[in-house]
Image (tube, grey):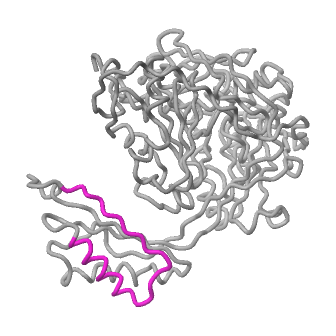
Amino acid sequence: MHEMLTGGELDYLTGDYLAELTMLILGRDRAKAPERGYAKTFLRQLEQCLGLAQDKGVRIVANAGGLNPAGLADAIRALSEKLGIPANVAHVEGDDLLPRAAELGLGSPLTANAYLGAWGIVECLNSGANVVVTGRVTDASVIVGPAAAHFGWRRDDYDKLAGAVAAGHIIECGTQATGGNYAFFTEIADLTHAGFPLAEVYEDGSSVITKHAGTGGAVSVGTVTAQLLYEITGGRYANPDVTTRIDSIELSQEGPDRVRVSCVTGEAPPPDLKVSLNALGGFRNQMTFVLTGLDIDAKADLTRRQLEAALTSPPEDIQWTLGRTDHPNADTEQAASALLHVMVRDSDPNKVGRQFSNAAVELALAGYPGFHVTTPPKDGEPYGVFTPGYVPAEKVPHVAVLADGTRIDIAQATQTQPLAEAPAAALPEPLPAGPVRRAPLGILAGARSGDKGGSANVGVWVRTDEEYRWLAHALTVDALRELLPETEHLEVARYLLPKLRAVNFVIQDILGKGVAYQARFDPQAKGIGEWLRSREIDIPESLLEGK
């Protein structure tokens, strides 16, 4: 926050504090103390920066209210009084559906929050608020709201709203748009401290993505493409105020660290709002055994048999994974070692508590040669399960609460369009046949992957039209299954995005019941894209010249 306020010109400072996992954490926080449930980090940052923002005339919009935006607004007012810095604080509420969860057919979750749009933020800003906090609005809404208020956009200015959604999607994850988590990071001169991105949004909805001068990282067509592909599906990207056509977006390098985002088209939003549902799934525990040297598979098999026999009251779920990090004839003990990981889950905390972890450690004297583990025995811990829900928008209140306490009901969209997959893009003309070479996909292609509930997406892009002509034909669903054997029995969908020279895959259920469930080695699917890039595939030699 301080860096953005001091680094250069700014009209609005926005912040996205709410991931799916964050909502679960805030839900547990609120269960302990009803006055909690908001992102306390935001309040600490504001203590250092409120005066600076006021001096510079910068207005702040953030979704840090989490499950308790009214509580955060009150805390900001108390902070303002303590600091002697006047602040006009407003908030947006209505997203919390927990009291009505059963009535709406959402079960009995720990948290139930609808994704609201930007028009409550617009109302707060139009009232003169210089700090606006919200609960669960969509990530892009904290950018759409200031743009719509600034330019006076109408509810049916779909192309303009869609352009702001695209800008919001690009900058919502901070430095992921300026070189962080970027496949071609070695091409960036200085990534020691990447600068945060900012969006210059124009009245027609187009934008330029850039960063403050003198900061590290880079803003390029590549870094922006990577972030556009993050956590999407196909050509349509639904938001409560507009459905953005991702397949319409055009990117161009306007200058150093300046990428123009243009030609974005929008459609009426869907009639239903997505709901983030988090529930306590039970309790879990885990241990990791270090297997060194020879007979790794036999050592793993012995450990499985011994531990499962020692558990007189077995947990409901026991999941074993063997990471073959060992190397033959290794010159260090670490390089000679593999890791055997066991995860247990049960609705009874006792079955995954010390009964499990003590049993694991007590194998030491009767176990495989060289037995040791990476952690001491410990109690089990609760874990959460995320599931998406959907409710008709008209059943969800959307309320702007102004600084003087005035409550303004925000109407939901009256013109809607059921969400359907965009028409499939046509395949480009294939490259002429010619000699190929077996090489890692990542020599040509970048990738970014991420989680959405229990599923994951992997967006793969290349940098020239010729490379895209090859990629679109070579990287099919069958090819992906061959390159990533873990996906063999999972449902996989592929979407072509020719204007981004990209192919996006959505892999269903690869993350089980979501991030907090920790169904796999990489529970948020952040590394799947890099795994895919490391896999070898036949690439035309004409595309590898100079690589």
Residue 302 magenta-highlighted: yes
The picture places residue 120, in percent across and down from the top left corner, at: 82, 37
524 vs 82, left or right, is: left
The picture places residue 131, in percent across and down from the top left corner, at: 72, 35
213 vs 370, left or right, is: right
Q: Nearer the viewer, residue 186 or 118?
A: 186
Identify the residue at horizontal 68%, vertical 42% (top origin).
63
Q: Nearer the viewer, residue 458 or 48?
A: 458
Q: Extreme bottom residue here?
A: 312
Snapshot quadrant of residue 88:
top right
Residue 304 magenta-highlighted: yes
Give the vertical position of 462 relative to 132 (above or below). above
The picture places residue 220, in percent across and down from the top left corner, at: 48, 19
Q: Is residue 13 visible?
A: no
- Picture quarter with the C terminus: top left
Give the vertical position of 482 relative to 28 (above or below). above
Identify the residue at horizontal 40%, vertical 52% (top origin).
485
Give the vertical position of 219 relative to 333 (above or below). above
Q: Which residues are magenta?
A: 298-326
Q: Extreme front residue here?
A: 433
Identify the residue at horizontal 57%, vertical 44% (top origin).
493
Give the vertical position of 408 relative to 222 (above or below). below
Q: Is residue 378 visible?
A: yes
- Picture quarter with the N terminus: top right
